[in-house]
Amino acid sequence: MVTDFLNQLILSFCISLGMITGGSLLGSLGALLTGGHPATTMMDLAQRLKIWAAVASLGGTFSTIRVLESMLWERQLAVLLQQISLVAAAFGGAHIGYVLIYWTVIS
């Protein structure tokens, strides 16, 4: 049970991270091909993709929100903390991806 949760936590983090880095890099390639500014486009895409990467890594917000709501009202704190941890891992992966893109563009 713990290993399944840990696997989900790591997958959620890595999916968010990959969506930010991959989407930003490929988007900057598109900007390069169309005559735009790759660095500016990369930063803009990394910022705009943060929320979508976190949502996609969770498999959609409605099921997670529904689970959070039901666990809150039923006072199942262990499951509630697991779901909050998954959301935090997804947002953490997205933010780390943004920071990596930021460091790449700035340096």
Image: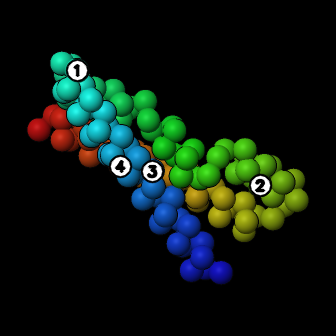
Residue 96 got which mark? 4
Vertically, is 12 above or below 4?
Answer: above
Q: Dot 4 lies on which element?
A: helix
State the residue at coordinates (42%, 59%): 14
Question: Residue 22: where, in percent of width, then height?
Answer: 33, 46
Q: Is residue 67 left or right of residue 95?
A: right
**Callout 2: 10 Å neighbours few (<14), some, many (20+)?**
some
Q: To which residue does mark 2 refer?
A: 67
The residue singled out by tag 3 in the image is 16
Mark closer to the chain start, 4 or 2: 2
Instruction: Say which quarter of the image contains residue 5.
Output: bottom right
Q: Residue at x 73, y 65 (%)?
A: 79
Q: Quick check: 25 left or right of 8? A: left
Amino acid at dot 2: Val
Mark closest to the chain's N terminus, 4 or 3:
3
6 in relation to 105, above or below:
below
x 81%, y 65%: residue: 76
Q: Which is closer to the viewer, label 1 or label 3?
A: 1
Q: Amino acid at mark 3?
A: Ser
- Tell me the residue at 20%/26% (across/down): 33
